[in-house]
Image (spheres, rainbow, N blue to C red):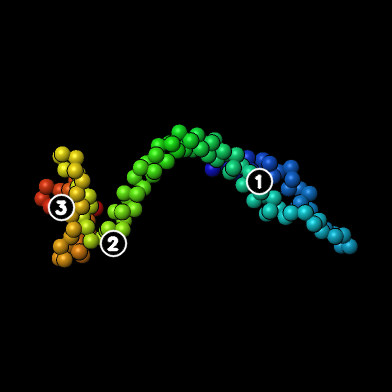
Amino acid sequence: MRHVSLILLLALAAPVAPPVLAQAGPGEEAEDGPSLMERGAQLFMRGLLSEMEPALQDLQERFAEVEPAIRSFVEEMGPSVLRLLQTVEDFRGYHPPEILPNGDIIMRKKLPEEMDQPDLLPEEIGPDGEVEL
């Protein structure tokens, strides 16, 4: 993609370059238009935007599909999450949440000697207590 943009930029800049590169002779005034660098930057940005447009359009369509679900989640769960944030002052004092077989979710408070240890999920710990980095 980058190569296509560069080729397109150079191809579009080629017809513009000769008059811009011509320097003003003695007694002539220089052109007050944008410099070659400014024109190149403008062409580059136009090319970048034209390449990004389909991806941005797709992202906008996907967000439109998900937006009602997100709104519903925020309306239903917002107050509960707010109460949780007010109850738990510092999440670093707790182990990661665990989901029990019956579906309950628990958050265990760390003991004072566990406060300096990093949080590891059970699946991150190997059979011999090894941690893969």
Q: Is 38 displayed left or right of 24 in the figure?
A: left
Query: Residue 87 in the image: x percent, y percent?
Result: 27, 58
Please tell me which residue lies in front, 66 or 62: 66
Q: Secondary structure at mark 2?
A: loop
- Percent position of residue 3, x then y: 55, 41
Mark 2 / mark 3, whichever is N-terminal: 2
Tell me the kind of residue under disc 1.
Leu
Check disc 3: other Cα within 10 Å, few if <14, some if 14-19, many if 20+.
few
Q: Which amino acid, by three-letter code, is at mark 2?
A: Glu
Q: Residue at x 58, y 43 (%)?
A: 48
Q: Is residue 6 above or below residue 92?
A: above
Q: Are marks 1 and 3 in contact (CB under 8 Å)?
A: no
Instruction: Give me the disc on residue 68.
Output: none
1 or 2: tag closer to the N-terminus: 1
Residue 51 sits above or below residue 20 on the image: above
Q: Amino acid at mark 3?
A: Glu
Q: Residue furthest left?
A: 128
Residue 49: x percent and y percent? Answer: 59, 42
Residue 131 shown left or right of residue 16 in the figure: left
Name the residue furthest right. 27
In 3D space, how far apart are the residues under numbered discs 1 and 3 (Cα atoms)? 53 Å
Mark number, residue 89 = 2
| Circle 1 residue | 43
Q: CA distance from mark 2 to mark 3?
A: 31 Å
Q: Is 80 in front, or is 37?
A: 80
Q: Earlier in the sequence, mark 1 or mark 3?
A: 1
| Residue at numbered disc 3 | 130
